[in-house]
Amino acid sequence: MGPSGVGKSTTAEGLAERLDWPFAEADKFHPKANIAKMTEGVPLDDADRAPWLAAIRDWISDEAEKGVSTVLTCSALKRRYRETLREAKARVRFVALEIDPERLAERMRTRKGHFMPPSLLKSQLADLEPLAADEDGITVSVDQPPQAVIAAVVEKLGLSAR
């Protein structure tokens, strides 16, 4: 979890490969209207996010009912968004990725091929509510190479990698 550009996809893809678990990108669950809105530089509101979060929650539940553990990227910026995801019929654990806001802004400016414009970073950072002590998750700095981030996630969550 974290704002756009923090490294969610890189970390999640590496984690999924290391654990041999299926991976899903939360952006794929957005309705077309949400993508159009963000492409135009308009921040999503809670009403826009509700069906998106419900679709993600339902996907997690569907996979869990098949006995499958998964890795999923999702900004999950607000606690109430994370609460929706925790309604899944599975244990949902969060990995909050952290980086200095200036470095994050630079990543956003140099990233290619993503619908999320750098102009929306400010609204994402304003919405970001860090994990609380009572939430099932960890925080990891991405101020290190991706493989070190992935190793830290595996270790802090007590997962066994292949």
Image (spheres, helix red, strand yellow):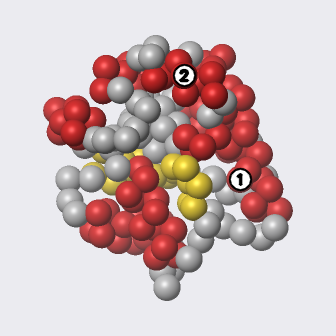
Image mark for residue 79: none
Q: Residue 45: x percent and y percent?
A: 56, 16
Residue assigned mark 1: 60
Amino acid tagged 2: Ala
Left or right of 96 on screen, residue 73: right
Left or right of 63 on screen, residue 144: left
Asked whether residue 32 appears in the rendered view, the answer is yes
Amino acid tagged 1: Ile
- Say which element carries label 2: helix
- Say which element carries label 1: helix
Q: Nearer the viewer, residue 43 or 128?
A: 43
Mark 2 / mark 1, whichever is N-terminal: 2
Q: Distance between the Cα atoms at labels 2 and 1?
A: 25 Å
2 or 1: mark nearer the eye: 2
Q: Nearer the viewer, residue 110 or 138?
A: 110
Asked if marks 2 and 1 touch (Cβ < 8 Å), the reply is no
Asked whether residue 138 appears in the rendered view, the answer is no
Image mark for residue 36: 2
Q: Measured along the vertical axis of the image, is residue 160 above or below residue 106?
A: below
Q: Measured along the vertical axis of the image, is residue 39 above or below residue 82?
A: above
Q: Label 1: how many residues lie within 10 Å, few (<14), some (14-19) or many (20+)?
A: many
Q: Residue 130: x percent and y percent?
A: 41, 35
Q: Residue 46: x percent and y percent?
A: 60, 18
Q: Residue at 55% of width from left, 50% of height from top?
A: 25
Q: Residue at 71% of width from left, 29% of height from top?
A: 51
User: Toward which corner of the image does residue 56 lie, by quadrant?
Assistant: top right
Q: Label 2: how many residues lie within 10 Å, few (<14), some (14-19) or many (20+)?
A: some
